[in-house]
Image (cartoon, rainbow, N blue to C red):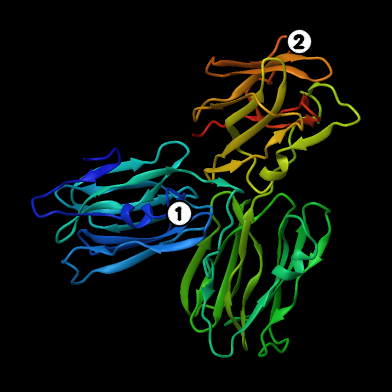
Amino acid sequence: MQGQHFAGHKNPDTQSFDDSALLNKYNGDTHKIQELTLVSNHNQVVGLSATYLVLGSNEVVHGGKHVGHKVDGSKTDTLRLENDEYITEVSGRGGDIIDSLKITTNTGRTVEVGGKGGNAFKLTAPYGQHFATLRGGLGGDLHFLDLQTQALPELGRYSFTAHPDQHLRGKRHGDTKEVSDVDLLKQHGGQHKIKQINVYYDDKFVYGLQVDYLNLKTGETVKGGLHVGSHWEGQGQVGQVQVEDDEYVTEIYGRHGDVLDFIGFRTTNENSSEFGGPGGAPFSVKAPNGRHFATLKGGLGGHVHNVEFTTEAIYPQKQNYQEGQHRRGKTHGDSQKFDDDKVLRNYPPSHKIWKLRVFHDNNTIYGVQADYFVFGPNVVVQGERHVGNQWQNGSEDVVELAADEYITELHGRHGDILDNFGFKTNKGRNFTFGGNGGNQFEVQAPAGQHFGTLAGGLGGHVHNLDFAVLPIHTRQ
C-alpha cells in the first residue's frame, strides 16, 4: 500500500525494496540515516543506499544496495550526516521514473543529483520527525520512493560515535603528523569559540596555524598549540584573523593538492580573511546551521597537509529576563533548584517546549518534565525529570504542543508548595492539574514571547516554578 511520503510511479517491471526488514530486529529502537549514497547520471537517478545508526546500541546497519541495471555512465554522491543531523526534506522531479533528487537535512545541507525531466515533487517530514528508512521501487532506474519517518530522537538520551573526517579538507600522507587542540581545551572546560587565528603562509603555501580561544564561561583566553610545518623558516608572513566576542567562524574554504595551498575563513558577520597561493583545487566546508567551527585539528609535514575544525553549537546569548521575574511559589530551606538551561545551552536559543509532562494527584503537583524542539538545527532535546521525593502514585499527564503552539500563560494555586498548575497556549488551549488548595496566581508572557525554558525548586513536592521567556519563533 502506498505510504504518506510517496513520489514516483509503480511500473509493471518495478521491483520493490524496503530496509525496514533489516531494522525490525532491533525491536523498534530509534535509528537514523547516517550516510546516504545516490547513484545517478545526467538524466535520471539509478539507485540509492543508506547506512543506519541504531541509537542506544550505537550499532551501524548497512542497508541494501538498491540500484537499477542502467548503471553505465553513472556516478555516486555520498552525504554523511552529523550525529544531530537528519534528513527532513526530499524533493526532485519524476514521472514514470525518478529523474532527479535533492536531499535536504535539518542543518540546511543539500545534495542534488539527476536530470531535468518529469514533474516537480517535494516530501517534507512532519514537525518533530525525520526520514528514517528507505523504501521504494526499482527497474532500470529508480521508479519511486516511499519513505518512512520516525520522531526525532531526544538528544541527551543517546551517546553517539562521531563521524571521522566529516570536516577534513586536504590529504594525509605517510609523513603526516596529526595535531589537535581538543585535549588542551578539555582541560579548561566549558564552551569556547575561536578568538584569533594566526596563519603562517607565503604566496604559494600555508605552513602552519595557531588559534587562540575564548572560554565562554570564564572569559579566559586559551592559547592553542603552535602547529607549523618543518619547511617554515620565517621567510613568509603571519596573518591574523580577529573574531569578535559575538562573532563565529562558520565557513572554511581554500585550495589544496598534496598540501594546503590557500585557506580562507568566513564568519557570522560576513567577514572574510584569505591567505596563501593560487595552486591546488578549490574546497569549501560550512558548519551546520546553528553551529560554528570551534577547535583546530589537522595534519602537518613540511607544510599544512590538511585541516579539520570540530564544530559546536553557537552559544546562546544571555536571556533577556531577570531570574525570578516569573517565579510563582515559595523557596524553603530544603528547596532544590532546577533549571533546564543546562541541557539547552549547547544549542541555539531558538527552542520551544514540545512536550510538557506533569506529575500530580488531586491535591498537589509533585514534578514536571519538558522536552524541547530547537528550531534551526531542528532537533528534540530531552529535559531533565524534576520530581519531588514524596512522589509515589498519582497521575502523569503529557501535553504535546503543535509546531506553532507556545505557552503564553501560567496559572495555578500555591501556599508553601504548588497545589495546582496549569497553562494556556497561543492557540487557546488550556490545561490544569492538581488540587484546590493555596492562593491563586496567574502570569502572562510579554507580548511576542513565550515561556520556553523550565526552571524552579523542588522538595517533597514542587515548591516553585520559574519559566524563562524567549521570543516566539517566526520562521517555521
SS assignment at label 2: loop
* Nearer to me, 74 or 261: 74
Q: Is residue 417 above or below residue 259?
A: above
Which residue is identified by label 2? 437
* Nearer to me, 70 or 138: 138
Residue at x 76% of width, y 27% of height: 466
Among the 4 quarters of the image, the one containing residue 181: bottom right
Q: Is residue 180 above or below residue 132?
A: below
Residue at x 80% of width, y 20% of height: 417
- Decide which of tag 2 and tag 1 comes sooner along the chain: 1
Could you tell me the amino acid type at mark 1? Arg
Residue 33's tag is none
Which residue is identified by label 1? 109
**In contact (CB < 8 Å): disc 2 and disc 1:** no
Q: How crowded is mark 1: few (under 14 residues within 10 Å), some or many (20 or more)?
A: some
Tell me the CA gap for discs 2 and 1: 53 Å
Q: Where is residue 451 in the image (x, y as percent from the top left)?
A: 66, 27
